[in-house]
Image (cartoon, grey):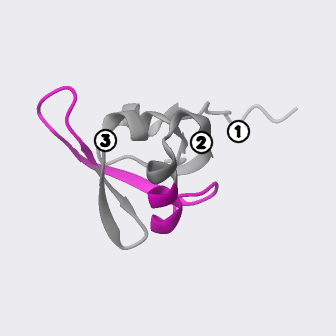
């Protein structure tokens, strides 16, 4: 068994550290309203897509700005909480 490769569990996009890159591991579509889910799909959020947290609002419930591809997208924290990300190996 190769112990040099650590398995890193997925975390919610909401809790991914700022300026940390990751890959979308899964999205809990059942936690999202239909319009929110549709918007995420239109923006390209899906399993295997690279994402990076850029900024967080200073207030605890404010939005999170993240990069997906070449776009910067603001997500409500409840939406970001439904997206599970595997942190990129660094």
- The answer to whether residue 16 is above or below residue 90 is above
Pick out the residue farthest to the top. 60
- For the point 22% across and 29% down, the residue is 61
- What's the distance in space between the residues labelled 2 and 1, CA to CA? 30 Å
Q: For marks 2 and 3, give the CA distance.
A: 15 Å
Q: 61 left or right of 52?
A: left
Badge 3 marks a residue whose secondary structure is loop
- Mark closer to the observer (1, 3): 3
Answer with left or right where residue 3 lies relative to residue 30: right
Q: CA distance from mark 1 to mark 3?
A: 33 Å
Instruction: Please determine whether, in this image, residue 66 is positioned above or below residue 27.
Output: below
Q: Is residue 39 inside the magenta stretch?
A: yes
| Of labels 2 and 1, the one closer to you | 2
**Reading the chain from its start, which is encountered first: label 1 or label 3?**
1
* Disc 1 + disc 3, Cβ < 8 Å: no
Residue 73 spot, x, y in % from top left:
31, 59
Q: Which residues are magenta?
A: 38-64
Q: Which residue is mark 3?
A: 76
Query: Circle 1 sits in a helix, a strand or a loop, which is it?
Result: loop
Query: Residue reaching furthest bottom?
Result: 70
**Image position, residue 55 (x, y; %):** 21, 47
Residue sitting farthest toward the front: 34
Which residue is under mark 1? 5
In percent of the image, x 82 and y 36: which residue is there? Answer: 2
Q: Residue visible at 56% across and 60% down?
A: 49
Task: Give the percent coordinates (x, y) of residue 72.
Answer: 29, 64
Few, some or many residues within 10 Å of mark 1 (<14, 14–19, 20+): few
The numbered dot on residue 29 is 2
Asked which quadrant contains residue 1, the reply is top right
């Amino acid at each position: 068994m190769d112990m040099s490769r650590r398995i890193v569990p997925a975390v919610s996009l909401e809790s991914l550290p700022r300026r940390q890159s990751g890959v979308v591991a899964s999205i809990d579509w059942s936690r999202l309203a239909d319009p929110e889910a549709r918007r995420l799909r239109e923006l390209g959020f899906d399993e295997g897509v690279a994402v990076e947290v850029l900024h967080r609002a200073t207030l605890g419930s404010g939005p999170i700005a993240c990069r997906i591809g070449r776009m910067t997208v603001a997500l409500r924290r409840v939406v970001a909480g439904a997206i599970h990300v595997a942190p990129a190996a660094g």
